[in-house]
Image (cartoon, coloured by chain):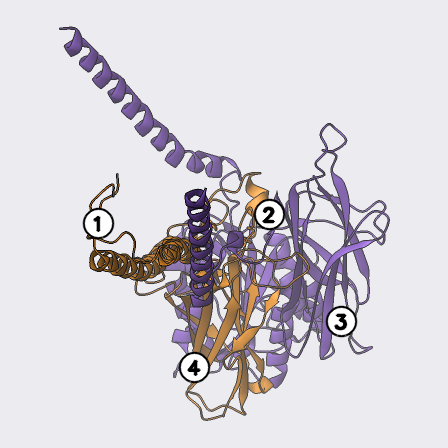
Chain colours: A orange, B purple
């Protein structure tokens, strides 16, 4: 049995449908972004990783090699007192979809220096492969009378998966090495203070890839146990809230909204071919 | 009555299930702790030996208005108060007893002031208080003796060398001594502190530090000395994975088989070292290597880590090159062995992967090539990755173009469907 409705009513219903579709699309995008942010480790909520630091203040020591690197969390300001010429190492977790930016500031010794000093910030992945910086002053030369030197390195987007022959950044540990690469011998061993902070921006589904590592590139994952334990082998090596599962991206929302739109457009198209429908003044069954 | 009984039963079942769930959760949350505690037998006791120069030059009164000796004593007292309880600490002196001019005697003048062991603060402080600046500066012999003092156990070892002058006991080069004791594979680091050092002392001390992966500090103030020694002692207390010594061979045949773990080796300039790792189908091999520049090397250098099959076919490589001042140069590789798909014992047989480590360091002819450069090799075997079948995430799309394309397709589909059904109705009406 067909209900007889006027063309106005039909048009109104179609408009309502389109509106709700648009609303859905918008809500979907927003929800997608929100969920993506919630799913990946929230950069703002960082907890301390020991070494006597609290949430705002990170560790106050740095390691001197890959093995002894001090773990830091994203958005945590780590400091270290050191001597010029020391190689300072920190290690931080980065998850798929994140664009990590590492910033370092070195307070140079106040005593008179004998020449300019060149400082460098290097980032290595969990396999100790050097990672390229997209931009940022990775190496900087400080004049003999400069008080501080600031270095930055913006890493490429961390991918969920990459071919084994590529050097693409993958989820896992990232080592930060800060050192003076060029200075007069007379200035070796002077006291300096280094600060390091890493932040991450989420790229969302734009960079999402299929495929996934069974375990993040965290050193010692396979040595402790055949099955990787979250946070087991090295404490502070996982981001807050653990590593992402890798299946979620806002592409699900986009695709679903696209499907809904296609369905609505299909209904609309079908209706267009039906014309205005049965004239309203005709009695039913005529 | 029956319903009530059933309800009760349901409730009790739920309760039991709940309790089970809680227990399971507790078990899960507790499980890693005993496992982690059970793996390494505690962690080996770290040992540190403070090696203090008590030569005649320590009398100079030029650190914050007091003598170098007094500054060192004051710093020691404060450091001894704050030694972490799980660190075993010893104190050795050099040039503390022989005031004479006989070089032969003066150059053997090194004494263990306080043996390495659990610290008795009062005793150690009393011993330090008796020191008076006296004799020569036999750094080389002192380092050798300190390395002997630290023998035993498998923990981290650190020598903190505090001196105000260069070694006066040539031809034994303290830098070479340091490199030799580091090459013994006993996880020993020498950190050096120079009290108001001159150019020669500085270059010697930084050479010693570089040879063992330690640090060099130039001390100008008492406070700085105290802070640094304290920092170094604290650093020793931090638990750290210690590598296992291994000796790679010149070819893959007969190369040592490595299980997942951390290994240390030595490799001379332009030498190749081979290792073998077994990888089962469906597993991923992860290997990283660092070669340390522990001596004066030429400005440009590199490292190559290559994974190849037993027949010599290269699978994947990691390579890195660099220039300028550095501590290590490192690279790594991943090799995921795909599942063969077949079943049975043959399909599960591990493949032997040959790992080759080579370096392109070079040095001036005057630089000694023995012992080789320190190599640190980390090997991990984990489950294989879920390979991507599509660059996009699960083949999903994204963006306004996608929405437009889908909507347009839907519209066209609807139109076609509508026209077809209209045509069918017309055909039916006509008939």
**Marks 4 and 1: which is nearer the front?**
1
Estimate how packed mark 4 is, as few (under 14), some (14 to 19) or many (20 or more) residues with alpha carbons within 10 Å: some
**Marks 3 and 2: which is nearer the front?**
2
Q: Position of residue A169 (x, y in %)?
A: 56, 63
Secondary structure type for disc 3: loop
Tell if the residue under mark 3 belongs to the same chain as the one under mark 4.
yes
**Marks 1 and 2: which is nearer the front?**
1
Judging from the image, mark 2 belongs to the subunit labelled B
Q: Which mark is residue B361?
A: 3
Q: Nearer the viewer, residue B236 or A31?
A: A31
Which residue bears the numbered disc 2?
B385
Secondary structure type for disc 4: loop
- Labels 3 and 4: the sequence-earlier one: 4
Secondary structure type for disc 1: loop
**Marks 3 and 4: which is nearer the front?**
3
Q: CA distance from mark 3 to mark 2?
A: 34 Å
Q: Position of residue B120 (x, y in %)?
A: 41, 50
Q: Position of residue A187 (x, y in %)?
A: 54, 85
Q: Nearer the viewer, residue B93 or B421?
A: B421
Q: CA distance from mark 3 to mark 4?
A: 41 Å
- Labels 3 and 2: the sequence-earlier one: 3
Residue lying at the far front of the rendered structure: B431
The answer to whether marks 2 and 4 mark residues whose Cβ atoms lie closer than 8 Å is no
Judging from the image, mark 4 belongs to the subunit labelled B
Which residue bears the numbered disc 4?
B63
Which residue bears the numbered disc 1?
A282
Residue lying at the far left of the rendered structure: B1
**Marks 1 and 3: which is nearer the front?**
1
The answer to whether marks 3 and 2 mark residues whose Cβ atoms lie closer than 8 Å is no
């Amino acid at each position: 049995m067909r209900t007889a409705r006027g063309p106005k009513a039909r048009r109104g219903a179609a408009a309502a449908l389109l509106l709700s579709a648009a609303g859905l699309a918008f809500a979907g995008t927003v929800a997608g972004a929100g969920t993506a942010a919630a799913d990946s480790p929230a950069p703002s909520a960082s907890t301390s990783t020991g070494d006597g630091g609290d949430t705002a203040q990170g560790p106050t020591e740095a390691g001197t090699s890959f093995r002894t690197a001090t773990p830091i969390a994203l958005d945590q300001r780590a400091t270290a007192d050191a001597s010029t010429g020391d190689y300072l190492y920190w290690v931080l977790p980065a998850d798929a979809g994140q664009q990590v930016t590492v910033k370092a500031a070195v307070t140079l010794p106040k005593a008179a220096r004998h020449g300019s000093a060149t400082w460098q910030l290097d980032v290595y992945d969990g396999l100790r492969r050097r990672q390229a910086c997209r931009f940022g002053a990775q190496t900087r030369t400080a004049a003999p009378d400069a008080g501080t030197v600031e270095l930055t390195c913006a890493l490429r987007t961390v991918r969920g998966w990459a071919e084994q022959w590529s050097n693409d950044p993958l989820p896992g540990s990232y080592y930060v090495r800060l050192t003076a690469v060029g200075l007069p011998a007379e200035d070796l061993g002077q006291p300096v203070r280094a600060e390091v902070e890493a932040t991450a921006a989420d790229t969302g589904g734009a960079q999402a890839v299929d495929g996934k590592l069974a375990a993040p590139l965290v050193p010692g994952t396979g040595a402790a146990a055949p099955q990787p334990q979250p946070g087991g082998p090295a404490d502070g090596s996982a981001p807050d809230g653990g590593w992402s599962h890798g299946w979620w991206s806002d592409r699900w929302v986009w695709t679903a909204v696209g499907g809904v739109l296609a369905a609505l457009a299909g209904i609309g198209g079908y209706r267009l071919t039906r014309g205005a429908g049965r004239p309203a003044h005709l009695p039913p069954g005529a | 009555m029956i319903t009530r009984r059933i309800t009760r039963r349901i409730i009790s079942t739920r309760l039991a299930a709940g309790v089970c769930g809680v227990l399971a959760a507790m078990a899960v949350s507790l499980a890693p702790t005993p496992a982690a505690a059970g793996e390494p037998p505690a962690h080996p006791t770290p040992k540190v030996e403070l090696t203090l120069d008590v030569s005649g030059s320590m009398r100079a009164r030029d650190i914050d208005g007091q003598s170098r000796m007094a500054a060192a004593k004051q710093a020691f007292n404060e450091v001894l108060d704050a030694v972490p309880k799980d660190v075993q600490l010893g104190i050795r002196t050099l040039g503390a007893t022989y005031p004479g001019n006989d070089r032969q005697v003066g150059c053997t003048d090194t004494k263990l002031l306080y043996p390495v062991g659990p610290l008795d603060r009062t005793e150690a402080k009393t011993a330090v208080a008796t020191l008076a600046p006296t004799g020569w500066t036999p750094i080389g012999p002192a380092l050798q003796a300190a390395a002997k003092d630290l023998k035993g156990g498998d923990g981290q070892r650190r020598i903190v060398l505090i001196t105000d002058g260069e070694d006066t006991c040539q031809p034994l080069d303290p830098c070479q001594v340091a490199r030799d004791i580091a090459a013994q594979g006993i996880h020993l680091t020498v950190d050096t502190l120079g009290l108001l050092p001159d150019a020669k002392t500085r270059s010697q001390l930084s050479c010693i530090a570089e040879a063992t992966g330690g640090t060099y500090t130039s001390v100008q103030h008492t406070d700085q000395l105290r802070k640094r020694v304290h920092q170094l002692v604290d650093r020793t207390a931090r638990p750290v994975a210690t590598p296992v010594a291994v000796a790679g061979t010149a070819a893959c045949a007969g190369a040592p088989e490595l299980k997942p773990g951390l290994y240390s080796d030595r490799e001379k300039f332009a030498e190749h070292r081979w290792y073998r790792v077994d990888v089962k189908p469906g597993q991923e091999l992860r290997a990283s290597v660092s070669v340390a520049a522990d001596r004066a090397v030429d400005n440009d250098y590199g490292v190559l880590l290559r994974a190849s099959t037993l027949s010599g076919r290269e699978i994947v490589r990691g390579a890195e090159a660099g220039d300028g001042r550095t501590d290590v140069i490192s690279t790594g590789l991943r090799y995921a062995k795909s599942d063969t798909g077949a079943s049975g014992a043959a399909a599960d047989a591990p493949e032997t992967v040959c790992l080759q480590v080579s370096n392109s360091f070079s040095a001036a002819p005057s630089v000694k090539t023995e012992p080789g450069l320190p190599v640190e090799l980390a090997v991990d075997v984990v489950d294989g990755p879920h390979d991507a079948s599509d660059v996009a995430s699960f083949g999903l799309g994204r963006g306004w173009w996608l929405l437009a394309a889908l909507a347009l397709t839907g519209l066209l589909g609807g139109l076609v469907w509508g026209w077809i059904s209209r045509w069918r109705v017309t055909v039916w009406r006509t008939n």
